[in-house]
Amino acid sequence: MQIIFKTSYDQDINILSKRGEYIRVTLLIVSMLAAPLFLDVYYLSELGLLLVYAIAGIGLMISTGFTGQVSFGHAAFLGIGAYCHSILMTTGVPFSVSVVLTTLFCGFIGMLLGRSASRMHGFYLAVATLAFLIIVETVIGEWTSLTGGYAGFLVPELQIFGVYLPEIWQQYYVDLGLTLFVVWGTANLLRSPTGRAFLAVRDSELSARSLGINVEWVKIQSFGISAAITGIAGILLAHHLAYLSPETFGVLESLKLLLMIVVGGLGSITGAIFGAIFVSLLPVLLSLLRDVLPGAISQQAGLEPMLFGVIIVLFVVFEPDGINGRWKKLLHFFETFPYYRKASFVRQKRYLKTERMR
Amino acid sequence: MSSLVVENLSIEFGGVRAVDGVSFAVEPGETFAIIGPNGAGKSTIFNLISRIYEPSNGSIHYGERNLLDVPPHRVVNLGIARTFQNIDLFEQATVLQNLLVGRHSRMSRNLLRDFLFIAGARAREREHRRKVEDIIDLLQIAHYRDQKISDLSYGARKNVELARALCAEPTLLLLDEPASGLNQEETDDVSFWLDDVKHDLGVTIVMVEHDMGLVGRVADRVMAINDGKLLAIGTPDEVRNNPDVQQAYLGIPA
Amino acid sequence: MLPIEDVIRLGFIGISQGSAYALIALGFVLIYKATEVVNFAHGDFMMFGGFVVLTFSEGFGLGFWPGLVVACLAMGLAGFLVDSLIMRRIIGQSQASIFILTVAFGFILRSAAGMIWGWSPQSLDTPFDGETMVAGITLGNERIAIVGITIVLCIALYSFFARTRMGVAMQASSQNQLAAYYMGIPVRRLISLVWAIAAILATIAGAMMAPVTQLDTSIGFIGIKALAGAIVGGFGSIPGTILGCLLIGIIEPFSDYFFPAIKGVSAYIVLLVVLFVRPDGLIVQTYQKKA
């Protein structure tokens, strides 16, 4: 194992402590900043969309990966964010004000929803969020006067401080800026009492409570901030889609968000980003599959959800740590080469940990 | 310094009186052990003090405060910290993170400030980190500071759990079977640490323990219970020689 | 105001719908009690089971009842395999992963059903055609059958768990798996059997619902409504579950009648309102987490 000699507490407080990490992240940010120089419009727009999904994934990661509160309804916050922002901008509210209002609104709704499940088993929240998603989809579809219903809603052009930003690269920088902000803020949370309370509630509510954590309130907070961040992703998604319709924000979209965090690796920011990359590459995988599979299957409408489902099952069963877990193993392999031993990562046998009183 | 006063405490689970009219008082600075056969209601008393269960009768006071007015997550703010019988750590977090959560009741927190990491957030982290490091030194667990709990051995977990409770700077420590599952050598370590905790930190200790050797070495007073009822309170020797206690343990008629 | 006949008619539709939800919810509760897993794919098991009944009874020409029996056996086997091949491997993973896994099952079943039987609704011939006049009100036979079958199955399940050796063993292992294991109860096989029973219940529910809803890949969503009912009733207890499901079932036709704009989502609204006002459900269980 690589031993890092620590000489100050700050090394543990800083977000990036290893030199390798520092170099990797700097390189990544620099290349993201430079991307418009060497990518053409199509790929740049795809990269922007990837960032949007990374934000949404981090949003979901906060409630599901860090706090252990499963949500099947995060597509609804994506939808609420997108519609709320578009409607506000159509009525003439400036972009920056609209972003703040929309984020707060999503956070507020998230807290209300989190309350409904703050006291009982985790699956109550899971079902409540699913119900919420279906209700939101219906309301968006039926409230024609506000949302345009199933006919759709035209998203106003991106305009910040009165300046129109019609170019793809301009939109890309808005995506990148907000992504960096969200990643940085979430990393901050994790090195603060608030974030540690999230992890504590996920791993043991009993202990968390005995150490002074108000478990109910932490769940509500976590769900609120998770919804707010997903709302930000919704805002950006609206500008990517340019045209909103209720079906965009349905159960399949929620499943896609869950797939992202499971495949990426539950419980880490990096996992959410890996997940976003994976989801962005799915269409490529899908078209490859269509070429390989016999026509009877490949032309079927159900291929996409089927693929989502199969990928989730494979990851949960065979690689519960997701791509992030693989990545860590790979890094560990290089750091300790040639002393890598397979046993370093052998999982201990686990047993059913009960949640109820016997 | 406050004393823990429990009066006429009772709780029922579906008609079974798990704790039945138990009264005792723990003086400041004392090490107080609760013993009794399995199912006697020892852990239940702990769970009542830490407000996991609601008693059906009786009162619990710590100093001036009536514990029954305090919600479970506020108990630690009165200076009462605890460990659990079947170690209950945050499995997927590191030792350091666990200990920092132990500081939770002493830390100010604010969602926005934490998200932006401004307004003295770093200074706060440093200060609490220093406090945690003192506990790490005391219990000599520095070498697995950065490991995940799920990678630790059983004995190490026991230590970390004790450390986590100490991080809350308690004045009263509830230890639920601190030596269960430990070998003789580790049990000896526990008795030294309990001495340190008592003398260096001045913490009052209430513990549930089966190991009578350990109880005899560290406890000032012992309370024996059976079937939720109090059998005897006194010095370890007095309790050991009490005929009711012997009957409960060995089945010898008094 | 509604004429009284309509109230009774809607009320009866509600009761039969509620019975169907209860029938499905029983499967959720069984699996939950045995393993603490909420099988979100249960509604899709029902949908898939309905299609399997269709295949055996009409595709292979066995007729309804023999087809139903064969389909139940097949789906029971499938349920058994799902547990013994997949669910058993992931014991100890976070609840989040397990929920997501079962949701993924649901999507796989739905896509598979669409690929095998097509995406357009199909009808299943059952012996419950026609209508019956009761006190001057016409009621569909298929609806009466649902209520009857639910009652029969509840009694059957109750006597299975209370009277038979295997049922008692299952109860024991749901109370304390380790203790049951030490008593020589084959816990793992029993849990797989619970999955099998749940899958069989789902198949029966699918066949009973087919005349009402048509067989369609999307009817798995009924499972979510059943789950909503179970939660409204407080989950854990079987009587609570049945009451909650009946409540949801009865509210639905009336709200669809009075508020057509939110047709189909009233069950979810009831769920959210109940959870917001009483996070433990209407019938509070006196469970406490063990320290």
Image (tube, helix red, strand yellow):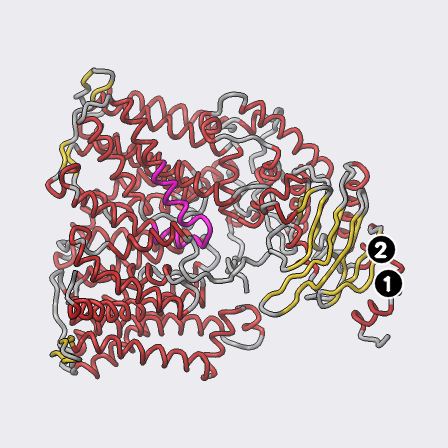
Nearer the viewer's eye, disc 1 or disc 2?
A: 1
Q: Nearer the viewer, residue C259 or B157?
A: C259
Image quadrant in which you'd find residue C17: bottom left
Among numbered discs 1 and 2, the one appearing first in the sequence: 2
Please state, as top left, top right, bottom left or bottom right, where the C terminus of chain C lies in the image. Answer: bottom right
Q: Main secondary structure of the magenta part?
A: helix
Q: Is residue B16 above or below residue C96?
A: below
CA distance for labels 1 and 2 = 9 Å
Please state, as top left, top right, bottom left or bottom right, where the N terminus of chain C lies in the image. Answer: bottom left
Q: Which residues are magenta?
A: A108-128
Residue at point 41%, 42% (across, down): A63
Mark 1 vs 2: CB contact within 8 A: yes
Image quadrant in which you'd find residue A313: bottom left
- Neighbourhood count class around disc 2 (C-alpha, 10 Å): few under 14, some 14–19, many 20 upward: some
According to the image, label 2 marks what residue? B216
Q: Amino acid at mark 2?
A: Gly
* Viewer can see residue C60: no
According to the image, label 1 marks what residue? B240
Residues behind callouts 1 and 2 on a single chain: yes
Q: Is residue A87 above or below residue C212?
A: above
Residue at point 33%, 49% (across, down): A129
